[in-house]
Amino acid sequence: MSGYFAGAIVDVKKKDGKYSVKQVQREKSLSLPVQGQEDSQLEISWSFGPLTVTGYFNTETLKIRVEVSVLRIILDSFYGNLKDSVVINFDLKLAKGSIKFYLKNENKFWVCIDIDVIFDGLYHKDIKLLLW
């Protein structure tokens, strides 16, 4: 028996009147890098506090493709161009806030996090992810 709760996929098992609940990792929904452009695509695998980001960044087109999770709850896969910035606002039961991916000085990939976790406090920081 599987169920959904706050965006998490869980597997619930019952044995001898006792329940066991385990969060199930979903298959990565993020598309693979574009073939023929491997040299200009950098892999992203980064986390800070409750935030985890995986994906790809193209240094020529400045486009990103990232899968974002907060408190291990996968929000979704997001696509965009750092020239315009990519902003994700979220409101979960245990955390709310925003994540902004943006370009600074034409060759620096930054992320601004503003996350409030109910049981763990505030995470507010601007962090340089990549310089090329």
Image: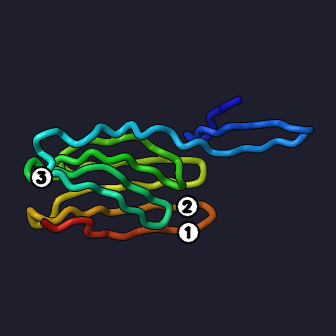
Q: Of the two numbered discs 3 and 2 on the same chain, state the one appearing first in sequence.
A: 3
Q: What residue sits right under mark 1 in the picture? A: 121
User: Which residue is rendered at x = 29% and y = 62% of the image?
Assistant: 111
Amino acid type, callout 2: Val
User: Which residue is rendered at x = 68% and y = 45% of the image?
Assistant: 22
Q: 10 Å neighbourhood of mark 2: few (<14), some, or many (≥20)?
A: some
Nearer to us of marks 3 and 2 is: 3
Q: What kind of element bears circle 1?
A: strand
Q: What residue sits right under mark 3 in the picture? A: 40
Classify residue 98 as left or right of residue 32. Answer: right
Q: Of the two numbered discs 1 and 3 on the same chain, state the one appearing first in sequence.
A: 3
Amino acid type, callout 3: Ser
User: Which residue is rendered at x = 35% and y = 58% of the image?
Assistant: 45
Q: What residue sits right under mark 2 in the picture? A: 117
| The quadrant where residue 8 appears | top right
Q: Residue furthest right?
A: 16
C-beta proximity under 8 Å, tags 1 and 3: no
Q: What kind of element bears circle 3?
A: helix
